[in-house]
Image (cartoon, helix red, strand yellow):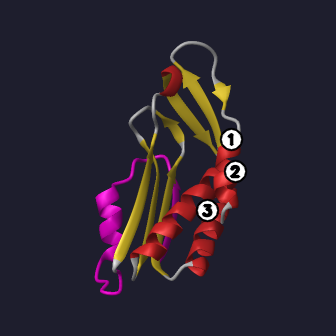
Amino acid sequence: MLRVLVQEAPFDVAAEMARLTASRDDIGALASFTGICRADDGLAAMVLEHYPAMTERALTRIAEDAMRRWPLTGCTVIHRVGRLTPGEPIVLVLAASAHRAAALEACAFLMDWLKTKAPFWKREEPREGAPRWVEARAEDDAAAARW
């Protein structure tokens, strides 16, 4: 089971976990990651922009790649767009497998690749000063390169 969503609305982590594991007896491990908007350097909000069809295709390809690389029985990727304020969830990744190593590794892979290969444009709105676009970071590229 593969589920990929790009949406403005918040997501319910528990509901998504329940959806992925419902009526399944082949899942022995469920790894998850929830990214949350934080208030670094006086951040008031972050705006995520995207081209819908392009973004959904890219996220689906990344999730399908994880499904091929690890023996996953399910995968969920939900990424929010629009204006998000500190404390709001941005991204949810769930990786289900019979065993924990595959679930944990796939979850880490998904986050590293989403961070570097997903076509989102991020603009930070500070409490003071002009908005600024977020540049790619070398440490994110290094993390993705390990895969």
Image spot of residue 96 (x, y percent): 42, 74
Residue drawn at (46%, 38%) of the image: 37
Q: Amino acid at mark 1?
A: Arg
Q: Which residue is mark 3?
A: 59
- At mark 1, the secondary structure is loop
Residue most extreme to the top = 128
Q: Which residue range is magenta in the image? A: 1-27
In front: label 3 or label 2: 2
- Locate residue 66: give its quadrant: bottom right
The quarter of the rendered structure image containing the C terminus is bottom right
- At mark 3, the secondary structure is helix
Work out whether mark 3 precedes mark 1 in sequence or the reverse, and give the earlier one. 3
Q: Amino acid at mark 3?
A: Leu
Q: Residues within 10 Å of mark 1 (few under 14, many from 20)?
A: few
Q: Which residue is mark 2?
A: 141
Q: Assess whether residue 21 is covered by the magenta stretch.
A: yes
Q: Which residue is mark 1?
A: 137
Disc 1 from disc 2: Cα separation: 7 Å
Q: Mark 1 and 2 residues: CB-CB less than 8 Å, in contact? A: yes
Residue drawn at (35%, 86%) of the image: 26
